[in-house]
Image (cartoon, rainbow, N blue to C red):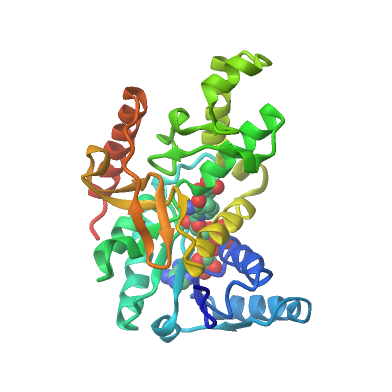
Amino acid sequence: MVKTHRKVVVIGAGSVGTTYIYALLQTGLASEIALIDLDAKRVEGEIMDLSHGLPFIPPVSVKAGTYDDCADAHLIVVTAGAKQTPGQSRIELIQKNAQIVQSICAQIRSSGSTAVVLMVTNPVDTLTQVAQRHLELPRGSVIGSGTVLDSARFKYMLSRHCGIDARNVHAYILGEHGDSEVPAWSMTHIAGIPIREYCEICKVCDYPRHHEQIAREVRDSAYHIIDYKGSTFYGIGLSLLRISGAILRDEHSVLTVSTLLEGEYGLKDICLSIPCIVGENGVERIIAARLPAAEQEGLERSAEILRGVLQSVSV
Ligand SMILES: NC(=O)C1=CN([C@@H]2O[C@H](COP(=O)(O)OP(=O)(O)OC[C@H]3O[C@@H](n4cnc5c(N)ncnc54)[C@H](O)[C@@H]3O)[C@@H](O)[C@H]2O)C=CC1
Ligand SMILES: CC(=O)C(=O)O
């Protein structure tokens, strides 16, 4: 059931946080949005600018917030922290951003909030796990945007390659939101037909070679965008909107958010992305599929890398 009062708190008034708010405002999905950042002037400027568009969209309140706003929020989206410089990996942000996330979580916790917390700050999988440790909330309520963006990039690139509407392509990237991500070809379908079968019928491209090229392009997208324009924010803004819709409308959508695994896929005590059913409580259920050996090995490699990152932080 759609709630009438739906409050979203966004922490981090940078490009990602404000692009997400700009998209969210226009949907009527939230009735109240509060923005928090260390930089109070920046928040004030963003709120003024966003508010001047309100006469053109469904009624919504947008304001500069404080951590007290978390108390009655339904969803808290954390986008605060350092971003990559050209050539820098997401993992290299861990020391700086783990401290930031730790301090933010302490303040969310003090507010007594029971909202779903959606982590976005990179490296998102490890920071989702750091947030899990610092917020006393059920495991499904602290999630990361994970590979929702990578899965969207995968669908878009397949759709462009095959000349088919991206909404008719079902495709998932699993594992780390980062260099070890795993394209789940075994879960990829077009018109309900497994992709390998579809490619054999279609015969337009040299498909094993093109598959590898598409997977590489998906994995390296963020590096290219950061090289060209400094940061990525539109794709993630709309990915966050999709996840927010699943939560605020209790949609039970299948999304590859980052979640804590407790034995699923043979993995324990690690946050990474696998297909999850997302509803008002965050992750309602993890879809524990059986993967072919190569994909399972890829997922285990991702988990190993993320375990190393987690061990490198002292929070
Ligand atoms: N998970 C994903 O798919 C994606 C994640 N990101 C990540 O999102 C994060 C934000 O990126 P941008 O918005 O481009 O960065 P940005 O530099 O534009 O904004 C970051 C904001 O965080 C604020 N901030 C820093 N420490 C804070 C604290 N303790 N409390 C409150 N606010 C604080 C800064 O004042 C700044 O306004 C980065 O870590 C980036 O890597 C970006 C794109 C996609
Ligand atoms: C920056 C980042 O994580 C992305 O665009 O994928």
Q: Quadrant of residue 295?
A: top left
Instruction: Identify which residue is drawn at 60% across, 33% down.
Output: 191
On the image, the x and y values in percent for residue 21 come to 61, 69
Extreme residue in the bottom direction: 68
Q: Is residue 83 above or below residue 13?
A: above
Instruction: Identify which residue is drawn at 44% across, 47% down.
Output: 256
Instruction: Identify which residue is drawn at 39% across, 42% down.
Output: 176
On the image, the x and y values in percent for residue 218 come to 55, 35
Q: Indicate left or right for 236 with 264 as reference.
A: right
Q: How many marks?
A: 0
Extreme residue in the right direction: 56
Visible residue check, residue 99? no
On the image, the x and y values in percent for residue 179 come to 44, 36
Q: Is residue 54 above or below residue 302?
A: below
Q: Is residue 281 above or below residue 144?
A: below
Q: Indicate left or right for 133 with 225 as reference.
A: left
Q: Is residue 9 above or below residue 91?
A: below
Instruction: Identify which residue is drawn at 65% across, 14% down.
Output: 203
Q: Nearer the viewer, residue 278 or 154?
A: 278
In the picture, the quarter occupied by the C terminus is bottom left
Q: Indicate left or right for 142 with 215 as reference.
A: left
Q: Nearer the viewer, residue 86 or 159?
A: 159
Visible residue check, residue 60? yes
Q: Indicate left or right for 127 with 237 as reference.
A: left
On the image, the x and y values in percent for residue 127 come to 35, 56
Q: Quadrant of residue 112?
A: bottom left
Q: Quadrant of residue 213?
A: top right
